[in-house]
Amino acid sequence: MLGHLLNEVKPLTATVMARIAAAYVLAVLVAYLLAATAATQAVLAGLEGLGVTITLGERISTTGHDLLGMLPSYGLLIAIGFAIALPIAAAVSRFLPSWRAFGLVAAGALAVGLIHIGLNSVFETHLVAATRTTVGMLVQVMAGGLGGYAFYRLRDP
């Protein structure tokens, strides 16, 4: 049975490798843009809860600032997490092809969730303030899942 499955594996041509690499980069960007934007909006919502008035212009400006500012750290962590999780899920899905979409979504979500759990356990604080609440953590995990879904849709068009 294993031999039969291995015979059906597609060869990794340069075109396939380029498509997978592009899908990976775009998946990381999707997850990062959603996660960082959600984190910024959660902080701004908290400030509004304290009575601070936040204009639309300030929201946009703050979001842009955070997207650039968090990229070298949070973006890199998501890229590393996806570099580990997505190939594992893709490899497993070769044996369970009907579960490919679920596996890649779960891998993206798990990668982002484990990033936050790991950061919290190492630094004993939530480096992304939004993850201090269950809802905030779930939104971050969902951003990872959407990144995994982007990888699924872009990897095998």
Image (cartoon, helix red, strand yellow):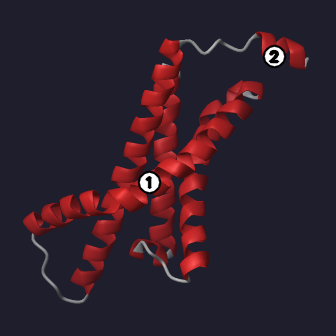
Residue 108 coordinates in the image, percent (x, y):
55, 47
Residue 33 coordinates in the image, percent (x, y):
33, 51
Query: What residue is rendered at 35% in x and 66% in y?
Result: 39
The outermost residue toward the bottom is 50
Left or right of 60 on screen, residue 71: right
Give the quarter of the image for residue 62.
bottom left
Q: Which mark is residue 152?
A: none
Left or right of 74 on screen, residue 69: left
Amino acid on which the number 2 mark rests in the picture: Leu
Q: Is residue 120 above or below residue 111?
A: below
Give the quarter of the image for residue 89.
top right
Is disc 1 surrounded by few (<14), some (14 to 19) or many (20+) residues within 10 Å?
Answer: some
Secondary structure beneath label 2: helix
Query: What residue is rendered at 50% in x and 68% in y?
Result: 137
Residue 117 coordinates in the image, percent (x, y):
59, 69
| Closer to the camera in the image, 146 or 121 | 121
Q: Which mark is residue 76?
A: 1
Query: What residue is rendered at 46% in x and 21% in y?
Result: 18
Q: How many marks?
A: 2
CB under 8 Å between discs 2 and 1: no
Mark found first going from the N terminus, 2 or 1: 2
Q: Which mark is residue 5?
A: 2
Q: Is residue 51 above or below residue 26?
A: below
Identify the image quadrant of the N terminus. top right
Give the quarter of the image for residue 122.
bottom right
Query: What residue is rendered at 53% in x and 50% in y?
Result: 80
Is disc 2 surrounded by few (<14), some (14 to 19) or many (20+) residues within 10 Å?
Answer: few
Residue 82 coordinates in the image, percent (x, y):
54, 46
| Closer to the camera in the image, 88 or 157 | 88
Amino acid on which the number 1 mark rests in the picture: Leu
Q: Nearer the viewer, mark 2 or mark 1?
A: 1
Left or right of 131 on screen, residue 64: left
